[in-house]
Amino acid sequence: MRKILIVGAGQSGLQLALGLNAAGFDVTVMTTYTGREIYDGSVTSTQCMFGHALETERAIGVDLWADSGHRIDALGVTVRAPDGARAIDWLGRLDHYAQSIDQRVKFSAWIEKVEQAGGNVVVNATTVTDLDKLAARYDLTIIAAGKGELVDMFDRDNERSTYTEPQRALALAYVHGMAPRPEHPNSGAVRLSLIPGHGELITIPALTRTGQCDILFWEAIPGGTLDVFTPGAAPSETLTTILELMRTYAPWEHERCAKVELTDQGATLIGRYAPIVRHPVAQLPSGGLVLGMADVVVANDPITGQGSNNAARFADTYLKAIIEHEDRPFDQAFMQATFDSAWKRVATCTAWTNAMLAPPPPHVLDAIGAASTTQAIADRFANGFSNPDDFTWLLDPGQTALYLSHAQSVGEGGS
Ligand SMILES: Cc1cc2nc3c(=O)[nH]c(=O)nc-3n(C[C@H](O)[C@H](O)[C@H](O)COP(=O)(O)OP(=O)(O)OC[C@H]3O[C@@H](n4cnc5c(N)ncnc54)[C@H](O)[C@@H]3O)c2cc1C
């Protein structure tokens, strides 16, 4: 039986481990924290996953929250005008539901599932020295340690990395008690409020330890008016600041928050990081090779909510490649080719995400505006979050103009 070592018990590592377990591999997962510690800890993401990514979980039977009642069925965009009013406001319908399952809930359950399936889970904050001793005992070692320190083993890919500095400062809180939008009382929708020159507010329905909740998530342009959060602040203080900024910059979402309260004392997160693409194969001091996966090698800003979706795409790609490789050696050529296949599935997503961090060019503004009068454009925009490869139309001004004129001539009313 072929032995695979996976370092990191997150979206990609656990999804791959569960898939490999089911396919008959001998899998070991190294994790810094036990499932219990993850469950009892603080939130780590907003982790909204759309239909295409959820399908990769469903394919290997690990979509444990399909019957939870938690569903996201739409994605809306609001743009703030200079006078503070809503210049644009529309809602696109998703063809397939999305979900945001608190990673504390998901990863702790998946760790248990790996163990139940006969996989080995080892609690160890793995170092390069550990790996140097361990890797030779496995047929393949995969590093799925998110944005942890092991990323330093992998060199930056300068051609594919757009930025060298964080493009947003991040602050979020999970809350109970948020009211629905009055105009769509029955819709569980992700809402993206664009505050030109300042940043973005994203609100996301989610399922946490204490049931259904909403996440209030600010993406602040560094050094700007929204970049006011203090790492290490008390959760209540972070929530107060989030709400004050909402009152000033996104009152249409603030008015939904009259009764909100934190879901728990670990319900806030503050941070920032630079988006980066890394080369996928790293060499250990004694010469062994390891393969990077998901955030380790492609870490995008969460402005488009794609990191977990990409992690699922990576896990799905690596799973198929490992199975199809049968008993041939997992050498450097295999590692590079496997990453290359995954890159094809996340390259457009990365380009689109990086574009969203820059001030929007006129053709993107045209598209966002057109979505408020033509429902088909709003729906296509929303469904692009599930299948970002479709966003090639938005990345090119000529294609955008062609698509918009076609969609508008076919014509449909706005939401
Ligand atoms: C504020 C914020 C909001 C986000 N919102 C979204 C969203 O809405 N939608 C979306 O798709 N994505 C979102 N993301 C991104 C998403 O959470 C990540 O991209 C995704 O979890 C990455 O999966 P991964 O498998 O690479 O790593 P992770 O899921 O981060 O898992 C890595 C694991 O490795 C462990 N680890 C680290 N170092 C070691 C070590 N040395 N030894 C052992 N274990 C180790 C960590 O503890 C962790 O459990 C968001 C991220 C942030 C920060």
Image: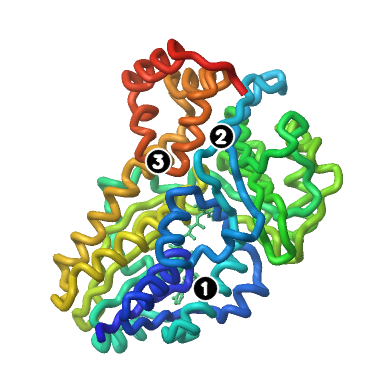
Q: Residue 138 placed where, x, y %?
A: 27, 84
Residue 237 appears in the figure: yes
Query: Which residue is identified by label 3?
Result: 388
Q: Amino acid at mark 2?
A: Arg
Residue beneath disc 1: 110
Could you tell me which residue is drawn at 41 percent across and 66 percent down?
60
Pick the quarter of the image with the C terminus: top right
- Residue 153 position in % (x across, y down): 32, 69
* Type of amino acid at the residue the image marks with label 3: Pro
Label drawn at residue 34: none
**Spatial separation of the CA atoms under disc 1 and disc 2:** 30 Å
Q: Is residue 4 left or right of residue 122?
A: left
Q: Disc number at residue 93?
A: 2
Spot occupied by residue 85 in the image (x, y as percentages of width and height): 72, 21
Tell me which label, 1 or 2, sits earlier in the chain: 2
Q: CA distance from mark 3 to mark 2?
A: 16 Å
Sort mark 2 into few (<14), some (14-19) or many (20+) by Cα contacts within 10 Å: many
Q: Earlier in the sequence, mark 3 or mark 2?
A: 2
Return the residue found at the far right. 259
Query: Which is closer to the viewer, label 1 or label 2?
Result: 2
User: Vertical placement of 9 versus 28: above or below?
Assistant: above
Tell me whether the residue at label 3 lies in contact with that at label 2, contact meaning CB atoms closer than 8 angstroms. no
Q: Residues within 10 Å of mark 1 (few under 14, many from 20)?
A: many
